[in-house]
Image (spheres, rainbow, N blue to C red):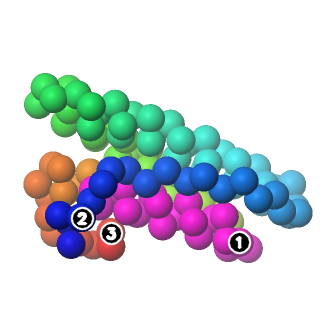
């Protein structure tokens, strides 16, 4: 139900976990890309001019997709990976909705 949408989902995970270095590198990289996408997404939502709004949303969407690709490399699938993945898909759905691509928006959910 899109009427209840309050804005992009931010991940506020503070727990630490032990994992192999390679897995940590993937998770940290995905988290950095996700945070960059979230910053662009929030800027786009604050910008009311249509051209900049759409352009920034497209940039954020590309960053979310890249974060998702990185997360899919994580074979352990710990709770942090799943949390970021769900937030990424939620935010992708919201961007598609903002761009009136309703079919793609529903595919993310």
**Percent position of residue 67, x then y:** 52, 52
Residue placed under numbered mark 3 in the picture: 108
Q: Residues within 10 Å of mark 3 (few under 14, many from 20)?
A: some
Instruction: Please tell me whether residue 92 is drawn above or below residue 79 in the rendered image.
Output: above
Q: Residue at x 16, y 29 (%)?
A: 48
Distance from disc 3 to disc 2, alpha carbons, whole Å, reads 17 Å
Would residue 51 be visible to someone looking at this image? no
Where is the N terminus found, in terms of image quarters?
bottom left
**Percent position of residue 92, x then y:** 34, 56
Helix, strand or loop at mark 3: helix
Instruction: Please tell me whether residue 46 is drawn above or below residue 99 in the rendered image.
Output: above
Q: Residue at x 19, y 57 (%)?
A: 97
Q: Which residues are magenta?
A: 75-94
Q: Residues within 10 Å of mark 1 (few under 14, many from 20)?
A: few
Residue placed under numbered mark 1 in the picture: 78
Is 43 left, or right, of 79 in this rendering?
Answer: left
Residue placed under numbered mark 2 in the picture: 4
Q: Residue at x 11, y 31 (%)?
A: 50
Q: Quadrant of residue 100?
A: bottom left
Where is the C terminus found, in terms of image quarters?
bottom left
Tag 2 or tag 3, which sits nearer the N-term?
2
**Percent position of residue 79, x then y:** 67, 71
Depth check, mark 2 against mark 1: the one in front is: 2
Q: Residue at x 40, y 63 (%)?
A: 89
Membership of 22 in magenta stretch: no
Helix, strand or loop at mark 1: loop
Depth check, mark 3 against mark 2: the one in front is: 2
Tag 1 or tag 2, which sits nearer the N-term?
2
Is 16 left, or right, of 61 in this rendering?
Answer: right
Tag 3 or tag 1, which sits nearer the N-term?
1
Membership of 80 in magenta stretch: yes
């Amino acid at each position: 139900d899109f009427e209840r949408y309050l804005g992009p989902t931010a991940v506020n995970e503070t727990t630490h976990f032990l994992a192999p270095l390679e897995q940590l590198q993937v998770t940290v990289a995905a988290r950095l890309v996700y945070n960059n996408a979230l910053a662009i997404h929030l800027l786009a939502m604050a910008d009311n001019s249509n051209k900049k709004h759409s352009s920034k949303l497209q940039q954020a969407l590309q960053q979310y997709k890249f974060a998702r690709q990185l997360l899919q490399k994580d074979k352990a699938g710990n709770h942090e990976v799943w949390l970021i993945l769900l937030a990424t898909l939620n935010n992708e759905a919201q961007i598609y909705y903002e761009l009136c691509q309703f079919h793609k928006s529903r595919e993310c959910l």
